[in-house]
Image (spheres, helix red, strand yellow):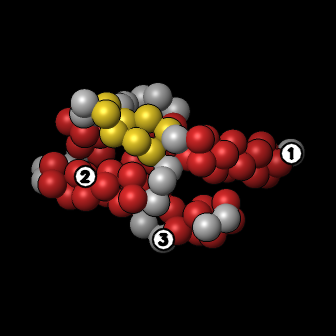
Amino acid sequence: MGVPETINWLKESKIRWKIFAIIATGRASKIRDLRVRLDMIDWWQVKQYVKDLVDRGLITEVDGNCRLTEDGQKVFESIQAVFDIEKL
């Protein structure tokens, strides 16, 4: 999958998009922290979104901590570039 397709996939779900953004910006790395930030009651739902991001190769989860993969970093940098252009 290319970066544009991955960005479109992220945008298909508001929660998926938010979880990716929270992890990418370093505001949370644990599922519990993500659940609190999103004000979601069901942590299983957050866990499923994280699994989707892991399966897509955008993040990795090690010992309960989530971080971007190399592909995830490329996607994040592309998103940042687009938003920087839109600010001009």
**What x and y, as percent, mark residue 41?**
13, 50
**What x and y, as percent, mark residue 6?**
58, 63
Quadrant where the C terminus is found in the figure: top right
Measured Cα–Cα span from mark 2 to mark 1: 34 Å
Q: Is residue 51 shown above or below 77?
A: below
Of pointers 1 and 3, the one earlier in the residue sequence: 3
Which residue is denoted by mark 3 in the rendering? 12
Crowding at mark 3 (Cα within 10 Å: few <14, some 14-19, many 20+):
few
Quadrant where the N terminus is found in the figure: bottom right
Tell me, yes or no, whether the two marked residues, 3 and 2, touch with CB atoms within 8 Å: no
Which residue is denoted by mark 1 in the rendering? 88
Q: Which residue type carries mark 1?
A: Leu
From where the camera sits, is residue 64 visible?
Answer: yes
Q: Which residue type carries mark 2?
A: Val
**What x and y, as percent, mark residue 32?**
20, 36
Numbered-mark total: 3
Name the residue rendered at 82%, 48% in the picture: 85
Which residue is denoted by mark 2 in the rendering? 46
Crowding at mark 1 (Cα within 10 Å: few <14, some 14-19, many 20+):
few
